[in-house]
Amino acid sequence: MHIAIIMDGNGRWATQRGAPRTFGHRAGIQTVRRIVEAAPGLGVSTLSLFAFSADNWRRPPEEVSALMGLLGAYIGSETERLITKGVRVSFIGRRDRLPAKLLSQIARLEAATAGGAALQVRIALDYSSRAAILQAALALVPERATLDGFARTISAPADHAPDVDLLIRTGGEKRLSDFLLWESAYAELWFTDTMWPDFEPQDLADAINDFSQRDRRFGGLARVA
Ligand code: IPE
Ligand code: IPE
Ligand code: MG
């Protein structure tokens, strides 16, 4: 099961507490830790996490650099644990605009966890789904110009993941904000008002439970009971 999460609401969570937005991002990283730990036990095989969108560069530079720093710190403190747990981590999105230090941390984490088989975690950084679709379209050779060929072209072989089964967005907004548009063609959608720092493994379990009761028809007819 491939679950994609738009981890939204860190800033508002902090503001509600009279704290700077960065405080919310710090708390959000703890949520990432908890959710990654809980995912394999809930039947998740691939987890795609939206951490920073290509449009998030519009934010104040202080917030952007705080976010990059927190991601680097997460990588530094989690690598050993991720290896132990068999989690393979890869990053999707543009790399050429990321700070050099973060870039080398990313490359090291990807290499160090490449053998993980318990869970595939894809972290979307400087990511735009429309840009990814355009890039794949430009790279597509005619003999692969099929839906399957396109699906394979849109992600690098190392990041390749099946279509999204369940897309979760925290923080109350009901939109996709340019995340995995192609891959979510038949994804079930689950929105919650819970802000990302407050999102618990139990919320993930609730979402999965709701998902498991849905009838995914893929254009066909309802299952006969
Ligand atoms: C976290 O939530 C997602 C990121 C872009 C890092 P936000 O920072 O968007 O928080 P809100 O939506 O302003 O509350
Ligand atoms: C989407 O959240 C991007 C991430 C969660 C990383 P945003 O907070 O940037 O999205 P909008 O601006 O509300 O659509
Ligand atoms: Mg937001």
Image (cartoon, rainbow, N blue to C red):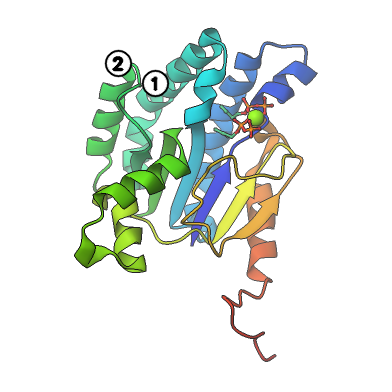
Q: Residues within 10 Å of mark 2 (few under 14, many from 20)?
A: few
Quarter of the displayed picture in which ligand 1 can be seen = top right
The correct choice, above or below, for 103 with respect to 206 in the image is above
- Vertical placement of residue 115 versus 71, above or below: below
- For label 1, being within 8 Å of ligand 1 is answered no
Q: Position of residue 175 (x, y in %)?
A: 66, 44
Q: Mark 1 sits on what residue?
A: 72
Tag 1: residue type?
A: Gly
For residue 148, side relative to residue 170 (left or right) = left
* Residue 101: assigned label: 2
Give the quadrant of residue 91.
Answer: top left
Tell me if residue 76 can be seen: yes
Q: Is residue 49 left or right of residue 28?
A: left
Residue that appears at 25% across and 49% down:
139
Judge the density around disc 1: few (<14), some (14-19), many (≥20) Cα neighbours within 10 Å.
Answer: some
Between residue 77 and residue 57, name the one nearer to us.
57
Please state which amino acid type lies under the numbered disc 2. Lys
Q: Nearer the viewer, residue 180 or 169?
A: 180
Cα distance in 3D space between marks 1 and 2: 8 Å
Query: Residue at position x 55%, y 65% from top?
Result: 186
Identify the residue at the far bottom of this view. 224
> In this orientation, does residue 116 appear?
no
> Does residue 57 appear left or right of residue 172 in this picture?
left
> The C terminus is located in which quarter?
bottom right
Picture coordinates of residue 190, whole percent (x, y) = 68, 54
Do the residues bearing badges 1 and 2 touch, measured as CB atoms within 8 Å?
yes
- Looking at the image, is mark 1 or mark 2 nearer the viewer? 2
Estimate the x, y position of residue 47 in percent, counting from the top left: 47, 49
For this rendering, which residue is in front, 45 or 220? 220
Q: Using residue 130 as the reference point, say whether residue 111 is left or right of it.
A: left
Kindly indicate the quadrant of the structure image that contains residue 214. bottom right
The total of numbered circles placed on residues is 2
